Image (tube, rainbow, N blue to C red):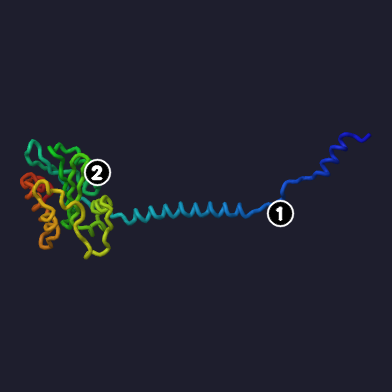
């Protein structure tokens, strides 16, 4: 009678190892998967490069010497008032908006920024309503606050200075007596410097005296 161990060994020998060997494995799916992983890695790398390009393209902050003015205009108990704001807000639209929301105005506040007497920005904040105006869209190539306004408005930045124009809410003061047509005409007045235009708009809004006091703090 054959030994049971011999019978068990014989069965294993007959059945053999039916697992696929390396020669039998279809490697194409594995190769495709590896290729897809490499493509995903390349895409991730490209995304990082795009972010770096955006950072390199973003303008450098205006220095304190380049900032003409950053101020808030508001009315308290019906009386026109103005106050100087921290100079760093001249480089940060979001920060400027947040600061204007803290100003105790009867009906919101107006922020004004001027840089290098090249362009100006007006921001009017009334609760959740925010209106912005940039006098020169080409300035978005060189200055952060101007770029912020262009991004906020989702407006393309012109590559040629000849294509520059005022952008934003030209009617932001229409309800207080300064029409869209007046604001547009002032912004496009090539014979007046930006600070002169700011003064004209401020005068029409009735803030001349408090504005002049704040402007003096900036040696204007």
Residue 23 in the figure: left or right of residue 82? right
Q: Which residue is mark 2?
A: 95
Horizontal and vertical percent for residue 55? 34, 53
Q: Which residue is outermost to the right? A: 1
Cα distance between the residues tagged 1 and 2? 65 Å
Query: Which residue occupies the foreground of this view, 193 or 24?
Result: 24
Residue 198 in the figure: left or right of residue 132? left
Residue 142 location, quadrant: bottom left
Mark linked to residue 135: none
- Crowd rating for badge 1 (residues with CA inside 10 Å; few <14, some 14–19, many 20+): few
The residue depicted at 15 percent of the width and 40 percent of the height is 108
Q: Nearer the viewer, mark 1 or mark 2?
A: 1
Q: Is residue 122 visible?
A: yes
- Crowd rating for badge 2 (residues with CA inside 10 Å; few <14, some 14–19, many 20+): few
Quadrant location of the N terminus in the rendered image: top right
The residue depicted at 21 percent of the width and 55 percent of the height is 167
Query: Which residue occupies the foreground of this view, 48 or 182?
Result: 182
Horizontal and vertical percent for residue 94? 25, 45
Q: Is residue 67 visible?
A: no
Q: Which residue is mark 1?
A: 23
The residue depicted at 12 percent of the width and 49 percent of the height is 174
Horizontal and vertical percent for residue 194? 14, 56
Per the image, label 1 sits on a secondary structure element best described as: loop
Horizontal and vertical percent for residue 85? 17, 43
């Amino acid at each position: 009678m054959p030994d049971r161990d011999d019978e068990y060994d014989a069965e294993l020998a007959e059945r053999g190892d039916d697992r696929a060997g390396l020669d039998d494995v279809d490697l194409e799916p594995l190769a495709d998967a590896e290729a897809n992983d490499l493509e995903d890695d390349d895409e991730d790398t490209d995304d990082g490069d795009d972010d770096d390009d955006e950072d390199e393209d973003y303008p450098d902050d205006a220095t304190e010497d380049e900032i003409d003015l950053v101020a808030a205009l508001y009315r308290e108990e019906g009386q026109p008032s103005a106050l100087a704001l921290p100079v760093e807000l001249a480089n940060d639209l979001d920060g400027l908006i947040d600061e204007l929301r803290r100003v105790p105005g009867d009906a919101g506040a107006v922020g004004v920024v001027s840089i290098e007497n090249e362009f100006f920005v007006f921001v009017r904040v009334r609760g959740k309503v925010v209106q912005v105006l940039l006098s020169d869209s080409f300035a978005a190539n060189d200055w952060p606050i101007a770029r912020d306004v262009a991004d906020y408005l989702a407006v393309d930045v012109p590559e040629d200075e000849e294509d520059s124009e005022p952008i934003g809410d030209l009617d932001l003061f229409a309800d207080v007596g300064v029409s869209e047509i007046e604001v547009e005409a002032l912004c496009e007045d090539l014979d007046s410097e930006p600070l002169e235009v700011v003064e004209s708009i401020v005068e029409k809004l009735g803030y001349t005296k408090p504005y002049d006091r704040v402007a003096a703090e900036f040696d204007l």
